[in-house]
Amino acid sequence: MQTGLIMLCLAYLLSQFFRAFLAVLATFLERDLGAGADDLAFASGLWFLSFALMQLPLGWLLDRSGPRRTASALLLLGGGGGAALFALATTPAHVSAAMFLIGIGCAPCLMASYYIFAREYPPAKFATLGSLMLGVGSLGNLIASYPVALAAETIGWRASLWSVSALSVLVALGIFLKVRDPAPSDSEEKGTVLDLLKMPVMWAILALMFVMYAPTGAVRGLWIGPYLSDVFGLAPSQIGTASLIMGISMIIGTLTFGPLDRIFGTRKWVIFAGNFGSALTMLALAFFIGTSATLSIAIMATAGFLGGTYAVMIAHGRAFCPPHLVGRGVTLVNLAGIGGVGLMQFVSGRIHESMQGTATVTAPYATIFGFFGFALLAGSLIFLFAKDNVD
């Protein structure tokens, strides 16, 4: 099982890479394919949307077929095939199609391991184990920063994508050979995700989950690149360094927040504190939008750190799920988080497009970051009505 979890961690590393590398490749894709920031926002949104749409059938597949076959098949076809399609892209539409396919392939990478944690380990350890998997897998976020910029400048972005495609195929085969499916649930109860949606306790959780990942997922995944390039004139290598700094802060935040529910005896207030703080930092970024690149990078890194409550949130939602619906429960909560980023990324792209040609170059980005900040602030306030649970 340990070797299998390592393979799933590598798969999640690839998932983190795929959701973040567009920010660093933006300059190259605009030069070679004519893909502007609006095109890449659409492509990034498609990744999150296809990822989110897969969560409902994924929950059923995990409960019925187990994580081994589910994760290996989807990563092989979606991750390996999608990266190959990206490497062959000649238009922005090809990039969008590739990102949609890659999102499907990445959908089970984290949830397969979370399913194993939920079924094989004590509930009280779920948040810590989930944060550890999230933190280690987030190294893919770092690889999608300066190393990608360096690879694109040396061997080219197409060769880089071919390499990632091959790696995806190898990891998928490793999952198929090494992951051991948990024993089937002893419960004879039947149910669907609708049973979870009928539980009032889930709705405040889902409301915050819908907006909590956008400040880190959307900004680190795309907007950090165009923003620093357009407003401060940073080169791709400098943007890669900034992305690396934000990625490191996200990992530190994830590992820091993971065990806090057991330390403080509460999940609700750990989650609220992190997300409320993240909302305030995004609003601060909008306010100080053109002050200096250093200050902006520091604020984005702070938002990345405070946004490290994702695994704790999954654990919070999982705590209310009956055993026979664990797979569908964790994927439902993940659906809200990833789907929220996808939809908000579409909105951010339209904001950027509609504000092109405004008096200042900072206006579109101030509006985008303000939109993320106010959305997260609203979600945090709704979450105050959530029930606490520490298993």
Image: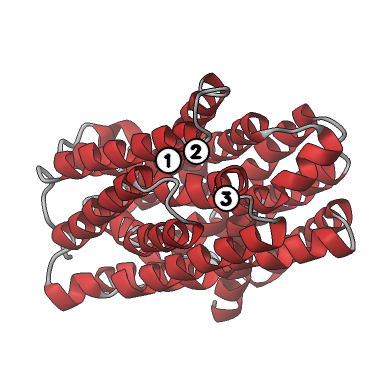
Q: CA distance from mark 2 to mark 3?
A: 34 Å
| Left or right, residue 136 beside residue 74 | left
Amino acid type, mark 1 = Leu
**Hey, what amino acid is under mark 3?**
Phe
Secondary structure at numbered mark 1:
helix
Q: Is residue 251 left or right of residue 152?
A: left
* Nearer to us in this view, 48 or 323: 48
Question: Would you place residue 64 above or below residue 181 in this image?
Answer: above
Label 2, on which residue?
A: 52
Which residue is at 45% across, 32% downward?
Answer: 363
**As rendered, which of 113 and 377 lies closer to the eye?**
377
Residue drawn at (13%, 73%), measured in percent from left and top? 264
Q: Is residue 8 visible?
A: no
Q: Are marks 1 and 2 in contact (CB under 8 Å)?
A: yes
Circle 3 residue: 232
Q: Which mark is residue 78?
A: none
Dot 3: what SS?
A: helix
> Of marks 2 and 3, which one's residue comes earlier in the chain?
2
What residue did someone put label 1 on?
A: 335
How dense is the environment of label 3, judged by Cα within 10 Å: few (below 14), some, or many (20 and up)? Answer: some
Pair 3/1: label in front: 3
Rendering quarter of residue 385: top left
From the image, which quarter does the N terminus lie in? bottom right
In the rendered image, the quadrant that contains the C terminus is bottom left
Q: Give the spatial CA distance, label 3 vs label 1.
A: 35 Å
Within 10 angstroms of label 1, few (less than 14), some, or many (20 or more) residues? many
